[in-house]
Image (spheres, rainbow, N blue to C red):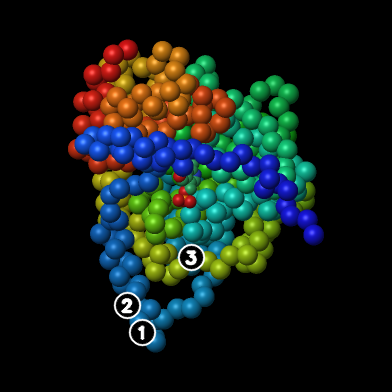
Amino acid sequence: MRINRGFLNLQDSYLFSRIAEKVTEYQKQNPEKEIIRLGIGDVTLPLAPAVIEAMQQAVSEMGSAHTFRGYGEEQGYAFLRRAVCGYYASKGVELEADEVFISDGAKSDLGNIPDVFAVENTVLVPDPVYPVYLDTNVMAGRSIIFSKGSIENGFLPLPEPGLHADLVYLCSPNNPTGAVYTKEQLKAWVDWALDHDAVIIFDSAYEAFVQDQELPTSIYQIEGAKSCAIEFCSLSKTAGFTGIRCGYTVVPQELVRDHVSVNRLWLRRQTTKFNGVSYIVQRGAEAVFTEDGLRQTQESINYYRENARLIADTLAELGLWFTGGTNAPYIWLQCPNHMSSWEFFDLLLERYGIVGTPGSGFGENGEGFFRLTAFGRREEILKAMDRLRKMPL
Ligand code: PLP
């Protein structure tokens, strides 16, 4: 009997447990000090009224024999898949309902999509980035190479001459850097993927935060992308669904590799291993895409955006290098005075009672950088910024 040894090759993720340990220790030593958390990647505002109403209605339906529903289609109810198509149409992207798969959030599908590609494929993962892409491929035993994010490329790596990879992960707006690819930059990736028979795994979990009209919110806004890209999105940050759980994955019919439709493989994979998202949640998700739902969720996004602006303005005043914050809920800053990510973490915690996330937790190239998030409450953000302004640099 052999286990999957890929699991043994995973690096232990000490990031969040080490942060928690340090914060607990600090609180023990300084019980009178108030800690402000600017490290959380979770939303804090409640669900939109339109979503609550739709879910309450769905709960009532489940309580009546005439409207009760059992198993639904694994790939999601048609009403929600059509609503997602409508949302894409508003971005100028035409999709068919059978190209949309409803998920219980982007993480599961991002972790599961490699199932349909051979283990021999080489994977290109950005560094720094959301750690799920790397870890799921390490588990599967794939060979992995990295595209390097840096100040020089604005943390938006592009295909380099001689690059060979079969699966390429792109995250835009990026977690943790908040950087967003332009249409021209995404076109470079799409052209490269088409030339190299590669597939782009495009994570657009933060697309709703993009406010610059010129920036793409879907890879399918780029010509040719339907033949080379799968897109993953989520209502977690768009509509506060982190606890409710719902997302969607787009696998275009045009995407064919090795003479096989990837859409057909993903449908087969999902109908075999997944039993769908609950009816109640899907009705709530449908409500996000109604006029009321879009307006109400936009209000929450605007609240987080304003938080991001307050953080960004303070960093600019301090003269620190940073990116993100305008079209993303994340602000990525360079630690001052050549400090390492953890040294800066300790300084912020011990001197200012502020908790953020060390950039080194998102990959080697995150060393020397730091992530702040805009998901906190306004009073806390304002208080934290007052404290930060006192930082001698
Ligand atoms: N993709 C990125 C870049 C994320 O940062 C996250 C969550 O933090 C996810 C996907 C997963 O989101 P969910 O599974 O809640 O949809």
Single out the residue that lies furthest toward the right.
1
* Residue type pointed to by label 3: Val
Q: Residue 44: image x %, image y %?
A: 30, 48
Say what secondary structure mark 1 lies in.
loop
Foreground pick, 206 / 7: 7
* Image mark for residue 64: 1
Task: Find out whether the residues at labels 2 and 1 contact each other: C-beta distance under 8 Å.
Answer: yes
Say what secondary structure mark 2 lies in.
helix
Q: Quadrant of the N terminus?
A: bottom right
Q: Residue 11: image x %, image y %?
A: 61, 39
Q: Which comes sooner in the sequence, label 2 or label 3?
A: 2
Q: Which comes sooner in the sequence, label 1 or label 3?
A: 1
Check disc 2: other Cα within 10 Å, few if <14, some if 14-19, many if 20+.
few
Single out the residue that lies furthest toward the bottom.
65
Q: Residue at x 45, y 30 (%)?
A: 358
Task: Find out whether the residues at labels 2 and 3 contact each other: C-beta distance under 8 Å.
Answer: no
Q: Residue at x 23, y 19 (%)?
A: 390
Along the horizontal axis of the image, is 186 left or right of 197?
left
Tell me how far mark 1 sits from mark 3, CA to CA. Answer: 20 Å
* Residue type pointed to by label 1: Ser
Q: Residue at x 40, y 64 (%)?
A: 281
Tell me how far mark 2 sits from mark 1, CA to CA. Answer: 7 Å
Tell me how far mark 2 sits from mark 3, CA to CA. Answer: 18 Å
In the displayed structure, 372 sits above or below 119; it is above
Q: Quadrant of the C terminus?
A: top left
